[in-house]
Amino acid sequence: MTPRITLAVARRVLHQLRGDPRTVALMLLLPCVVILLLWWVFSEVPGGMLDRFGPAIIAFMPFTVMFIVTSVTMLRERTAGTLERMLAMPTGRGDILVGYALALVAICLVQATLVIALAVWVLGMEVGGPIWALLVVALADSFLGTALGLAVSAFARTEFQAVQFMPALVFPQLLLCGLFLPRDQMPRAAEVISDFLPLTYAVEAMQGVQAGVDGAVADGTWTHLLVVVAIAVVVLALGTLTLSRRTD
Amino acid sequence: MTSGPVVQVADLSVIRGGVEVLHGVDLTVEGGELVGIVGPSGGGKSTLMRAIVGVQANVAGTVRVLGEEAGSPSVRGRIGYVTQSPSIYDDLTARQNLQFFAAIQGVGRRQVEAALTTVDLAGAADQVVGAMSGGQQSRVSLATALLGDPSLLVLDEPTVGLDPVLRRSLWSTFRDLAAAGAAVLVSTHVMDEAERCDRIALLREGRVLATGSPAQLRERTGADTVEAAFLALIDEAAA
């Protein structure tokens, strides 16, 4: 890995996104629109639905958006031959992965700041722990999305397929993560499956920040966060294997 | 400077999708030499070039570039490689594409501008590649390969779809690059382009049918053109 090359990759990904303002607007505003909708739909019934579902949405949105962006752009690199060109040059595989992660985590920083500010300061979502901790968890989730998107790009032949992986990965995890029903009330098998799903830990980390008191997060929050980051690192390492310099 | 040939291929076999597509190919390219790989499509030209660049899997035999194993880290920065379809970002401008690859090669803005001028794109440099014509796109791709003064240029059908004026000017660029000491390996299926090479390797069905200068090949077969020589050699091989 060479810092010069890593940064060049990150800068180039950002250049590409800047040339596509509609995508940038969708990335930045979609989470805000969803959280606004959540607040609005439940605004006439009691029960603090924003407090219950808000943290999960803040966890899912950066994951989903980064997953889609990474899987599609990386798939394009593979099909257009630019990946091969980079690898035929002095680029290391780590430069590509870290460059992508840097660019997308930077975007997520803006995205998550917007949605968290909206949820907490405008819509009044209750958060017991520090607000920056929400941001940290959101960044970890976007990193996970980037890692998975990269891995999936190796298995998808077309952009159409890559996008289809999104609901395949997101909806089962959404149902199993304990959001709709506490995990200990699920069938035993479902609970065991949920133990192995990264978004379970992402949502629990978010909820842990929310359930904190006096500016401290609840017990176990950092462990959950660590699990998310560890899974992302493992997936990213597996993704590296899919970037083989020599192909058939 | 490395002594010995820039490209040294010996007994190269490549298996793709379970089928052997190159069967014991030998080829050398010296610095300062413009060598053409000529032959029908499907003959293995691209596979041979990919093996030399070091991106082809399932390679058996010897492929050495600048004295090193093909694809090894120390030679990767010294090769310019152009694939058949333009491998560039179509959502960036020509200049942004070149700046990105220049950053990978560790070369500066001046080289970017020089490469753009060489391929006659200085006027269109800030156009988004996706909005360019096919010919312009392949020129952007070619310009990318010129960055960093490569010691070896591997160009896979770089002039397909270009107009005759530009083709002539690019061939004189290849000639200049070779004159400056680089080894230039160009594949083509246009036989009159092959006449411009110092040496030609005729590649058909994964085997080198013949190598030699255009004059030698014509002489050997008694043909007037390289195309006729090629056809004569195929008939000879079939007989």
Image: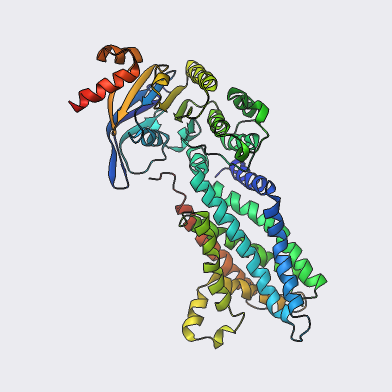
Q: Position of residue B13 (x, y in %)?
A: 29, 37
Q: Quadrant of residue B3?
A: top left
Q: Quadrant of residue A110?
A: bottom right
Q: Position of residue B110 (x, y in %)?
A: 65, 26
Residue B145 position (above or below residue B211) = below
Query: Which is more toward the observer, A130 or A33?
Result: A33
Q: Position of residue A30 (x, y in %)?
A: 70, 63
A124 to the left or right of A163: right
**Residue at 33% of width from left, 29% of height from top?**
B9
Q: Quadrant of residue A107?
A: bottom right
Q: Position of residue B191 (x, y in %)?
A: 38, 21
Query: Which is more toward the observer, A182 or A22?
Result: A22
Residue A40 position (above or below residue B163) = below
- Quarter of the rendering occupied by the N terminus of chain A: top right
Query: Which is more toward the observer, A163 or A55?
Result: A163
Q: Can residue B212 be seen from the camera position used here?
A: yes
**Residue at 59% of width from left, 68% of height from top?**
A226
Q: Can residue A237 be seen from the camera position used here?
A: no
- Quarter of the rendering occupied by the C terminus of chain A: top left
**Residue at 63% of width from left, 35% of height from top?**
B94
B173 to the left or right of A64: left
